[in-house]
Amino acid sequence: MIALPGDMRVRLVTALILVVAISQLQTIPVAATVLAAAVTVAVMSGIGGKAWLRMLHVETFMILLFVTLPFTVPGRAVLTIGPFDASAEGFTRAAVIACKVSASVLTIVVFLGSVEAMRLGAALHSLRVPEPIVRLFVLTVRYLSVIGGEARRLQEAMRARAFRPGSNRHTWRSYGNLVGMLLVRALDRAQRVEEAMLCRGFSGRFPWQKPPRLSRSEMGFMALATTAAVLITAADRL
Amino acid sequence: MSDPISLSDVTVERDGAAVLRDISFALGASERLAIVGPNGAGKTTLLRTIAGLERAKAGRVTLFGKDCGSEADFRMARPRIGFLFQDSDDQLFCPTVAEDVAFGPLNTGCTSEEAFARASEVLGTLGIDHLGDRIIHKLSGGEKRLVCLAGLLAMRPDVLLLDEPTNGVDTENGARLRDRLRAFGGAMILVSHDDGFVADMANRALVLEGGRLRAAEIHEHPHMHSHAHVHTLPEGA
């Protein structure tokens, strides 16, 4: 098992550095090596079965690349289906992209997958992300499940009154009403949330906590990640 | 000392129709006033008017001896009034329990340490200090209610306005809620359909009906009654 730093800022920055480096790779050997490394780290840090299942969604999208790119990238033909030629360069490009995307997603899953999205707010704020964006993010995450619950209950109530969706006018009108109702309720709720904040003395400035200083080992961790990022970039380009 | 809250001839309109009509009453410093009435009678509107979330069309709202008319007036008074909303999800917007409870004190100028010390103290008095680090949207309804109350108590208010405090609260958390409210030293206005809770908590009652306030009394008497029962059948019957 690998122990990752607990500080969200370190995790965010490290993941960002690595993903930026990975996204710039151009050669298959380096991209494949990075993917292998990412898989190893993911296995060792013990990401759950749910996370691997999520990877499956990503890989499904990758199939699309292998189907389309060989036929659209010009180059030496290696496969002919009817009037269409598949190029070796196209396969290579698809493979590089697949490796990079998989490795990036794994990196993000390892660093942030197990983190409650809500806990990222303070980290984003201390990394100088503009406050309105952070607040939007945090409140969206907080109320997503509430509004999702409302949507579910409304839908269940529709089903309980024998509603069966089809492709007809009645269905579209009903779904329109459902979405409209959700919007109206969300607006009302936003109003009430603001009022509740006012009642507790909120005056427009959010009282963020001061983040703790980074420890030496956390700085070391980021330095290590940066070195890895530089190394893979160098190996790829030289 | 003047009464914490007093209203005189307050009328509140919504969409041109009066929701509250000529409301007058005063709440003493340690009074526990229950306001009862049918749905839609204007109970929540009354609480919102006191907190300045709804403006009176006519009449005077006086909080802690000061006439309040503008947002600035109410803003001054709000930290001394803890308003418990009907829906806990409206009130709890922070990621974790401790952060949410510390939100009020941070707004009123406490340092981060003070605010979080207050938060853990209040959570302790409610018997839910184990919830401090929990993510709010994963709490049960009863736990959310207690956390809401903790967020208000952390501001050390002189008055509590409670809108259906026992809504969606299970027996165990309900007991914690009652214990803590009984220990609260200030004044209280409570709006509730839970008659047992009202009888238990309030020492004065008013009835709000059709936007008008009338005096009422809380009394207790035994009822002779008969009603249908459902029992499980013995095994094999």
Image (cartoon, coloured by chain):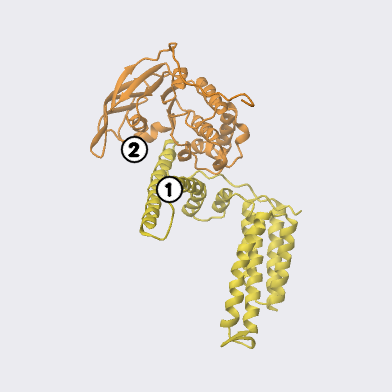
Chain colours: A yellow, B orange
Q: Residue at x 56, y 53 (%)?
A: A124
Q: Secondary structure at mark 1?
A: loop
In the displayed structure, does residue B64 sit left or right of residue B184? Answer: left
Amino acid at the residue labelled 1: Ala
Output the chain of dot 2: B
* Residue A162 badge: 1
Considering only vertical position in the picture, is B139 above or below B199?
below
Amino acid at the residue labelled 2: Glu
In the displayed structure, does residue B203 sit left or right of residue B25? Answer: right
Q: Which residue is mark 2?
A: B71
Residue A12 in sight from this viewpoint = yes
Seen from the viewer's position, the closer of residues A17 and A209 is: A17
Residue B63 in percent (x, y) is at 35, 27
* Residue B167 badge: none
Query: In the picture, residue A112 is in which quadrant?
Result: bottom right
Q: Residue furthest front?
A: B237
